[in-house]
Image (cartoon, helix red, strand yellow):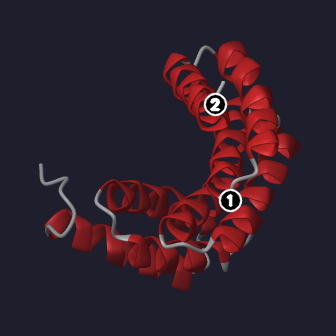
Amino acid sequence: MNTLPGGELEGRRREVHRLAVEGRRAGIARRVGQVLCQGWLAVSRFEEVRRVSSSTLSLGHDAGAFNDLGRALYATGDRAGALESYGQALRLYRQVGDRAGEATTLNNIGSVHQARGDLDQALDLFGQALPLHRQVGDRAGEATTLTDIGRVHRARGD
């Protein structure tokens, strides 16, 4: 099975996503778009992530698409756009009670604030994310957040 970006499977997924958007099939567009974006984010294909996330969002709000878009915007230097996208994702995750999504998004927002030099805000956001990761049993998310907290303390000279 070809799962690498750029292969025949990617081409088929792109076409399914395009048809789903054209046919206003939001559920399909979201699922396929998420698979495409996760693969592209892993190999720094941020423009493709922006295009697919934006077209998915044309069908309505989706926390996952906002989060993917935020990651692409952040990676390309658009911190304000990333914060806006992450803020939308956070609101949606909270509306549906998705604590795992909320924790990941809080961590993403914290990373943007850390990059902007707002270390107190970053530390606060990481502090909000940590108990949520623990609550849902996300050990990898917990480890990431603890690492991020450590980086903030190191940057502050603590």
User: Taking 85 as reference, is 76 left or right?
Assistant: left
Q: Secondary structure at mark 2?
A: loop
> Nearer the viewer's eye, disc 1 or disc 2?
2
Look at the picture and state if 68 lies above or below 123.
Answer: below
Q: Which mark is residue 83?
A: none
Look at the picture and state if 59 lies above or below 37.
Answer: below
Q: Nearer the viewer, residue 41 or 24?
A: 41
Look at the picture and state if 48 lies above or below 144.
Answer: below
Residue at horizontal 66 percent and vertical 24 percent from the top: 158
Residue at horizontal 66 percent and vertical 48 percent from the top: 114
Q: Amino acid at mark 2?
A: Gly
Q: Which mark is residue 157?
A: 2
User: Taking 146 as reference, is 97 left or right?
Assistant: right
Q: Which mark is residue 116?
A: 1
Q: Are marks 1 and 2 in contact (CB under 8 Å)?
A: no
Residue at horizontal 65 percent and vertical 68 percent from the top: 79
Residue 85 position within the rendered picture, expressed as x and y whole percent measured from the top left: 71, 65
Q: Amino acid at mark 1?
A: Arg
Residue at horizontal 80 percent and vertical 29 percent from the top: 128
User: Taking 154 as reference, is 5 left or right?
Assistant: left
In which quarter of the view is residue 117 placed? bottom right
Label 1 or label 2, whichever comes before in sequence order? 1
